Image (cartoon, rainbow, N blue to C red):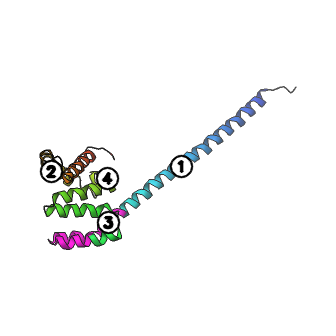
């Protein structure tokens, strides 16, 4: 059997230390690559989100312009045209709800706000650049008591119950509830 002196033990210890350090460096490099990948993915998502916001603003700008000019009927027709191209787009529903609300078609406006929030809950998120949280909150605050009274006085009315359910849904989403 070969004897082990201090030199052999020192050499073996240095070799073992080098192997451990190399292993840690390799593992640390993997962590670094994964964190860079995570940052890249988050950046890509942010860029895609910002592009979507810009796309929606540009797409619906003609509707907003017509609305500002007081041409609500023309704005609604333009929304119909866009809805045929983009049938599941929540932003059109939000704009339609706002226009209908301006025209005192409250029940229909509530329906469109509900559809929009169901399609994209970001409209009740205050941090979202397209948020309509304040408008929706105002709608719920003003209309919920009115529709609650109406529904109590006419409990068999399905349209009233549907509108009331929509208002409760919006209230829930404003409070942070999910679907």
Q: Secondary structure at mark 2?
A: helix
Q: Of callouts 1 and 3, which one flags the residue occurring earlier in the amino acid sequence? A: 1
Q: Of 147 and 33, which appears nearest the observer?
A: 147
CB atoms of marks 4 and 1 within 8 Å: no
Residue 108, position as x, y percentages in the image: 20, 59
* Residue 107 at x, y percent in the picture: 18, 57
User: In the picture, residue 129 is in which quadrant?
Assistant: bottom left
| Label 2 to label 1: alpha-carbon separation | 50 Å
Q: How far is mark 1 from mark 3, CA to CA? A: 33 Å
Q: Which residue position is annotated with label 1?
A: 34
In the picture of the structure, the residue carrying the numbered disc 4 is: 121
Q: Is there a contact, CB below 8 Å, between mark 2 and mark 4?
A: no
The magenta segment: 52-79
Secondary structure beneath dot 3 equals helix
Q: Which mark is residue 145?
A: none
SS state under label 4: helix
Q: Nearer the viewer, mark 4 or mark 1?
A: 4
In the rendered structure, which disc, 2 or 1, sits on the residue that comes first in sequence? 1
Q: Which residue is mark 2?
A: 143
């Amino acid at each position: 059997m070969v004897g082990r002196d201090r030199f052999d033990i020192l050499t073996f210890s240095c070799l073992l230390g080098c192997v451990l350090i190399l292993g840690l460096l390799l593992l640390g490099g993997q962590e670094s690559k994964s964190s860079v990948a995570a940052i890249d993915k988050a950046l890509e998502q942010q860029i895609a989100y910002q592009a979507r916001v810009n796309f929606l603003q540009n797409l619906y700008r003609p509707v907003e312009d017509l609305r500002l000019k007081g041409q609500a009927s023309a704005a609604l027709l333009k929304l119909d045209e866009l809805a045929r191209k983009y049938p599941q787009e929540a932003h059109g529903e939000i704009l339609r709800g706002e226009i209908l609300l301006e025209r005192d078609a409250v029940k229909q406006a509530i329906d469109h706000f509900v559809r929009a929030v169901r399609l994209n809950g970001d409209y009740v998120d205050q941090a979202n650049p397209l948020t309509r949280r304040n408008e929706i909150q105002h709608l719920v605050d003003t209309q919920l008591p009115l529709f609650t009274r109406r529904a109590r006085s006419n409990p068999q009315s399905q349209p009233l119950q549907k509108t009331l359910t929509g208002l409760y849904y919006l209230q829930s989403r404003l409070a942070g509830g999910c679907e």
